[in-house]
Image: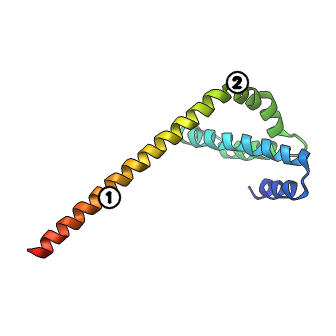
């Protein structure tokens, strides 16, 4: 994690667009890998050499010689995300709206609980 993070920093600092794009592709692929890994760890971690293969895969992704992340991004992720971009954007908007509504409801419930607790405490103290 430190190697790609540091070289991402260097790309941003030097404003090297080519390197910036390379590391952005890496982080997009790595994010998808992390989500996938969460599921696969639960189901196939018993497989012999599983953890060694994961390490080798991450090295392949970030290696400047193999450019694995760029390959996966250009061949698979970019076409997939481009074709589903509108649907993903709509889903994110809906999730944000639901999240806001949920927070408002939790806030109301919290205020109601606090008010009830305050009234209950006041009644007990008054008796």
In the rendered view, would you say 34 is above or below 9?
Answer: above
Residue 53 position, x and y percent, is 71, 42
Report the quarter where the N terminus lies. Answer: bottom right
Q: Nearer the viewer, residue 59 or 125?
A: 125
Image quarter of residue 3: bottom right
Asked whether, in this view, residue 65 is left or right of residue 8, the answer is: right
For numbered disc 2, what is the local secondary structure? helix
In the rendered view, would you say 94 is above or below 125?
Answer: above
Which residue is tagged 2? Answer: 83
The residue sitting at 62% across, 33% down in the picture is 89
For numbered disc 1, what is the local secondary structure? helix
Residue 41 position, x and y percent, is 58, 42
In the rendered view, would you say 86 is above or below 92?
Answer: above
Residue 86 seen by the camera: yes
Residue 49 seen by the camera: no
Q: Which mark is residue 111?
A: 1
In the rendered view, would you say 112 is above or below 40?
Answer: below
The residue sitting at 43% across, 44% down in the picture is 101
């Amino acid at each position: 994690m430190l190697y790609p993070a540091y070289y991402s920093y260097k790309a941003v600092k030097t404003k090297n667009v080519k390197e910036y794009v390379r590391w952005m592709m890496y982080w997009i692929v790595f994010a998808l890998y992390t989500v996938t890994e969460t599921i696969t760890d639960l189901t196939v971690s018993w497989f012999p050499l599983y953890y060694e293969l994961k390490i080798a895969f991450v090295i392949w992704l970030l290696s400047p010689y193999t450019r694995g992340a760029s390959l996966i991004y250009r061949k698979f992720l970019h076409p997939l995300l481009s074709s589903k971009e509108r649907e993903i954007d709509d889903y994110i908007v809906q999730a944000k709206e639901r999240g806001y509504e949920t927070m408002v409801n939790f806030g109301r419930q919290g205020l109601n609980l606090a008010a009830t607790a305050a009234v209950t405490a006041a009644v007990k103290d008054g008796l």
